[in-house]
């Protein structure tokens, strides 16, 4: 109970308590009923009694040491208990990396009366765990896009760039829109509400840009060989002029995309979406 807070592992404490009880009860069966081992049985009973006294505090260790239990959660608990309780040094709680209080232990939690607020702590633990899950989901999606780069081919008989990996990228984007939509409707999204909304908006812009670009590329690949013909240019001067403008934009966008390379960074532009 006296190890520093961030070295305490709640799940291991719970597991150890159960394992000790099983081992001691097995040992008790071996020694029980023998006069020469009565002292061993009494010692085992005393240890089991001590474990029983401690066991009621195990849920504190389990629930307060879940991943995602941040300073904001300790502030909520402090408000519930009407006293400051935190494993961080006072005055550093609002920092992005608060300083651990080395004097804070499970024993201190017990002394401060946390056990009387166990139901609130369990609710807070659930909240912290769910929020941590949301944080991990968002970070994973951000990380996934770091490696999504444009892949280009050269259009046959030309020097024009065309994109290869539309379907794979669109599938990833659709998957992330689904995940983000689920997060958007989570009852635990509160602290991430603006971030989730912003990310949802980005994915929707990327989705529209990629879908339109893919459709445009199909049309472009059909028309490009036609309007590079001198005969067609002479026969259809008005349409040729329109295509030349489109071709100029196509080359500009694919050149810029190749320079940026990262699909998300390039396709999240509302200006690009509107142009496509």
Image: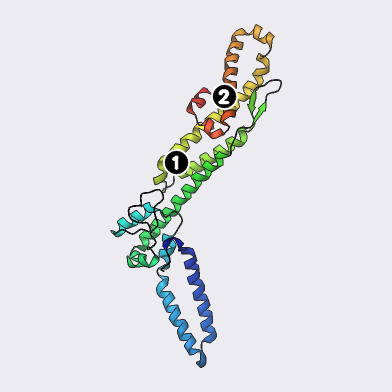
Name the residue that disc number 2 marks.
Answer: 253
For residue 270, above or below residue 129:
above
Provide the secondary structure element on which disc 1 rests.
Answer: helix
For residue 152, above or below residue 143:
above
Quarter where residue 222 is shown = top right
Name the residue that disc number 1 marks.
Answer: 196
Quarter of the image that includes the N terminus: bottom left
- Tell me the colour scheme of the image: rainbow
Residue 70 x/y as whole percent:
40, 53
Q: Earlier in the sequence, mark 1 or mark 2?
A: 1
Residue at image x 50%, y 93%?
A: 35
Residue at image x 54%, y 29%?
A: 209
Provide the secondary structure element on which disc 2 rests.
Answer: helix
Q: How many marks?
A: 2
Residue 267 x/y as whole percent:
53, 30
For residue 259, above or below residue 76:
above
Residue at image x 41%, y 42%?
A: 193
Quarter where residue 113 is shown = bottom left
For residue 244, above or below residue 39:
above
Residue at image x 63%, y 8%?
A: 236
How crowded is the residue under tag 2: few (<14 C-alpha within 10 Å), some, or many (20+)? Answer: some
Q: For this view, does 208 lie left or right of residue 127? A: right
Q: Do the numbered discs 1 and 2 sit on residues whose CB atoms are within 8 Å?
A: no
Residue 39 x/y as whole percent:
47, 88
Outermost residue toward the left in this view: 82
Outermost residue toward the right in this view: 157
Q: 265 or 122, which lies in front?
A: 265
How crowded is the residue under tag 1: few (<14 C-alpha within 10 Å), some, or many (20+)? Answer: some
In three-dimensional space, the C-alpha distance between marks 1 and 2, rounded to whole angstroms, equals: 29 Å
């Amino acid at each position: 109970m006296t190890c520093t807070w961030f070295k305490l592992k709640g799940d291991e404490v719970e597991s150890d308590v159960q394992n000790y009880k099983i081992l001691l009860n097995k040992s008790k069966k071996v020694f029980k009923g023998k006069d020469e081992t009565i002292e061993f049985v009494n010692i085992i009973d005393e240890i089991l009694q001590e474990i029983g006294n401690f066991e009621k505090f195990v849920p504190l260790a389990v629930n307060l040491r879940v991943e995602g239990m941040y300073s904001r959660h300790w502030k909520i608990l402090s408000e519930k208990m009407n006293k400051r309780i935190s494993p961080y040094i006072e005055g550093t709680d609002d920092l992005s990396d608060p300083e651990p209080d080395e004097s804070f232990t499970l024993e201190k939690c017990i002394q401060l009366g946390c056990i009387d607020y166990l139901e609130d702590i369990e609710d807070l633990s659930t909240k912290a765990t769910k929020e941590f899950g949301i944080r991990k989901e968002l970070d994973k999606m951000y990380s996934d896009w770091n490696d999504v780069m444009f892949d280009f081919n050269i259009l046959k008989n030309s020097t024009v760039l065309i994109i290869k990996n539309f379907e794979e990228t669109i599938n990833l984007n659709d998957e992330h829109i689904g995940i983000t939509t689920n997060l958007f409707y989570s009852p635990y999204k509160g602290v991430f509400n603006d971030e989730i909304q912003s990310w949802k908006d980005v994915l929707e812009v990327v989705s529209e840009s990629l879908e339109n670009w893919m459709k445009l590329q199909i049309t472009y690949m059909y028309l490009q060989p036609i309007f590079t013909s001198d005969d067609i240019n002479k026969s259809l001067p008005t349409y040729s002029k329109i295509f030349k403008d489109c071709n100029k934009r196509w080359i500009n966008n694919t050149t810029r995309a190749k320079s940026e390379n990262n699909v998300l960074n390039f396709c999240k532009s509302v200006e690009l979406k509107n142009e496509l």
